[in-house]
């Protein structure tokens, strides 16, 4: 079954879909643009002085520490992929959650209230989660380290589509619709973006393409 993979990181995630016996087709719906080098330097320096760092994506880890080691500071990480990425750079994971940024921040509320918190993030971060973090962390320093721009996908034939961000959903609708497709999503924010058009068929139980690929494979096998 041919599954449209809409992230810009096809080489990283395609093997996960093949492991699930699906045929990933690269139809990117997003283009990611890093912040100016000066912003990345300031964010990197701030994390070294932080009491705790919030990381909501492995992409942030790649922008801040592309070749070097992360600082010896406790990290609150959204998803196993983010946790693994920071560990590979010698980082110290304090807490990992698989239910989204807002819920994870609430679980870490005591730590956020007491520490100097640095949150390097996407310019397109979930506003509801941001509001919660800002309320919980009185000593919060934020940096927008990248921005995601929606782009239209190609017109390849697929039976399913995998979305990992609201921006990808927006990009898909620049050129296509979801009629007749099995739709899989990562995270409640992406699910809400799809739900503006129709109900998603599959919601990954944790924020990773591995989990989504397995869930799509299971759903499509049952459906067939």
Image (tube, rainbow, N blue to C red):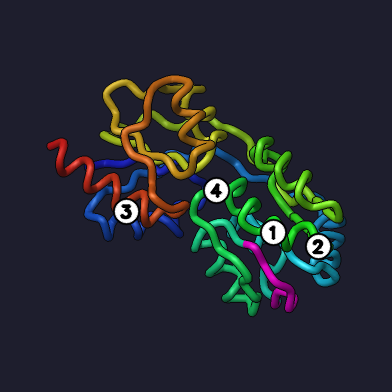
26 left or right, relative to 63: left
Q: Which residue is mark 4?
A: 100
Camera-side mark, 4 or 3: 4
Q: Between tags 1 and 3, which lies in front?
A: 1
Going from N to C along the chain, the mark reached first, 4 or 3, is 3
Q: Going 72% across and 60% down the picture, which residue do you hit?
A: 110
Q: Position of residue 153 (x, y in %)?
A: 46, 32
Sequence-wise, the earlier of marks 2 and 1 is: 1
**Residue at mark 2:** 114
Name the mark on residue 54: 1
Q: Which residue is mark 3?
A: 17
At a point 66% along the width and 59% down the height, the residue shown is 108
Q: Earlier in the sequence, mark 1 or mark 3?
A: 3
Q: Secondary structure at mark 4?
A: loop
Residue 14 image position (x, y, % from top left): 37, 55
Residue 115 drawn at (x, y percent): 81, 64
Q: Element at badge 1?
A: strand
User: In terms of sequence position, does the residue under pointer 2 or pointer 3 come before the other?
Assistant: 3
Alpha-carbon distance for marks 2 and 4? 22 Å
Q: Neighbour class for label 4 at 10 Å: few (<14), some, many (≥20)?
A: many
Q: What is the residue that sits farthest to the left in this orientation?
A: 224
Q: Secondary structure at mark 3?
A: helix
User: For residue 16: magenta?
Assistant: no
Would residue 71 be counted in the magenta stretch?
Answer: yes
Real-space CA distance between mark 4 and mark 3, rounded to the nearest whole angstrom: 22 Å
Crowd class of label 3 (few under 14; some 14 to 19; many from 20; radius 10 Å):
many
Number of labels in the image equals: 4
Point out residue 76 in the picture as x, y percentages from the top left corner: 64, 63
| Vertical order, 184 against 106 (above or below) | above
Of residue 76 and residue 162, the one placed in the foreground of this image is 76
| 28 w.r.t. 169: above or below | below
Q: Which residues are magenta?
A: 69-76
């Amino acid at each position: 079954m041919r599954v449209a993979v809409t992230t810009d990181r096809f080489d990283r995630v395609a093997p996960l879909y093949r492991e699930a016996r699906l045929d990933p087709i690269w139809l990117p719906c997003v283009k990611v643009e890093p912040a100016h080098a000066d912003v990345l330097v300031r964010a990197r320096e701030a994390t070294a002085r932080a009491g705790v760092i919030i990381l909501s994506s492995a992409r942030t880890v790649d922008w801040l520490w592309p070749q070097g080691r992360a600082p010896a500071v406790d990290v609150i990480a959204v998803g196993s992929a983010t946790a693994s990425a920071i560990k590979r750079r010698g980082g110290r994971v304090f807490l990992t959650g698989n239910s989204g940024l807002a819920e994870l921040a609430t679980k870490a509320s005591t730590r956020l209230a007491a520490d100097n918190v640095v949150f390097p993030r996407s310019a397109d971060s979930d506003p509801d989660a941001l509001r919660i973090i800002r309320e919980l962390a009185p000593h919060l320093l934020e940096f927008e380290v990248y921005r995601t721009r929606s782009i239209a996908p190609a017109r390849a034939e697929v039976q399913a589509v995998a979305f990992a961000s609201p921006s990808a959903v927006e990009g898909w609708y620049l050129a296509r619709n979801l009629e007749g497709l099995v739709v899989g999503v990562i995270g409640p924010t992406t699910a809400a973006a799809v739900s503006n058009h129709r109900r998603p068929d599959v919601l990954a139980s944790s924020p990773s393409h591995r989990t989504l690929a397995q869930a799509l494979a299971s759903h499509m096998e049952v459906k067939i």
